[in-house]
Image (tube, rainbow, N blue to C red):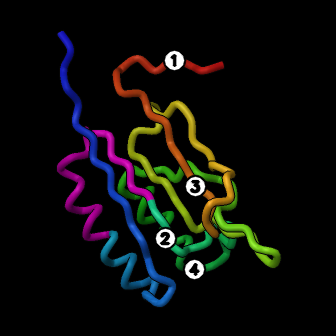
Amino acid sequence: SSQKKAYIIGNFYRSPSNKPKEFLDQMECILNSLEQHSSKQIILLGDFNIDLIKYEHDKIGQLIDLMTGHGFAQVISRPTRITDNSMTLIDHIYTNKVHNMISSGIVTYDISDHLGPYITIALNDEVSAIC
């Protein structure tokens, strides 16, 4: 018999004017409330406006530590915003069930000033390789 699964998907936007510390505090509160749902596939994504390419920045380490400490992995590794002067990875996707991930990447259509990150996940227990 097929059992229905529950998924939690959260979409976030951190305005550049919002202090990273306040955002991290709010994110920690959200992650703490999600702990009761850790058996479910959880995907947290959005424009965090924290550039993961500049890893030496203190707030980046705090964000990664916070997310990994709650069992989440960031699955986007390429820049999501490219200008004539910069390349930044500010649009993130985190998941707590990486083993259910089939693929992730960037949609390279130029319809916004950001490129669209995506994740493909298995909707059943059988994850098979694409290649």
Q: Which residue is mark 1?
A: 128
Give the alpha-carbon distance from disc 2 to disc 4, as whole Å: 15 Å
Residue type of the residue flagged with mark 4: Asp
Tell me the element at label 1: loop
How far across and how far down the image is residue 114, in percent?
Answer: 61, 65
In the rendered image, the residue lying farthest to the top is 1
Name above or below for residue 46 compared with residue 24. above
Q: Residue at x 42, y 47 (%)?
A: 95
Give the alpha-carbon distance from disc 3 to disc 2, as whole Å: 13 Å
Q: Which residue is mark 3?
A: 116
Q: Earlier in the sequence, mark 2 or mark 4?
A: 2
Residue type of the residue flagged with mark 3: Gly
Q: Residue 25 got which mark? A: none
- Circle 1 packing at 10 Å, graded few (<14), some (14-19), many (20+), is few
Q: Which residue is mark 4?
A: 58
Residue nearer the viewer, 53 or 32? 53
Give the alpha-carbon distance from disc 4 to disc 3, as whole Å: 26 Å
In the rendered image, the residue lying farthest to the front is 111
Residue type of the residue flagged with mark 1: Ser
The residues colored magenta run 28-45
Give the alpha-carbon distance from disc 3 to disc 1, as whole Å: 25 Å
Q: Earlier in the sequence, mark 4 or mark 1?
A: 4
Name above or below for residue 119 compared with residue 64. above
Q: Earlier in the sequence, mark 3 or mark 2?
A: 2
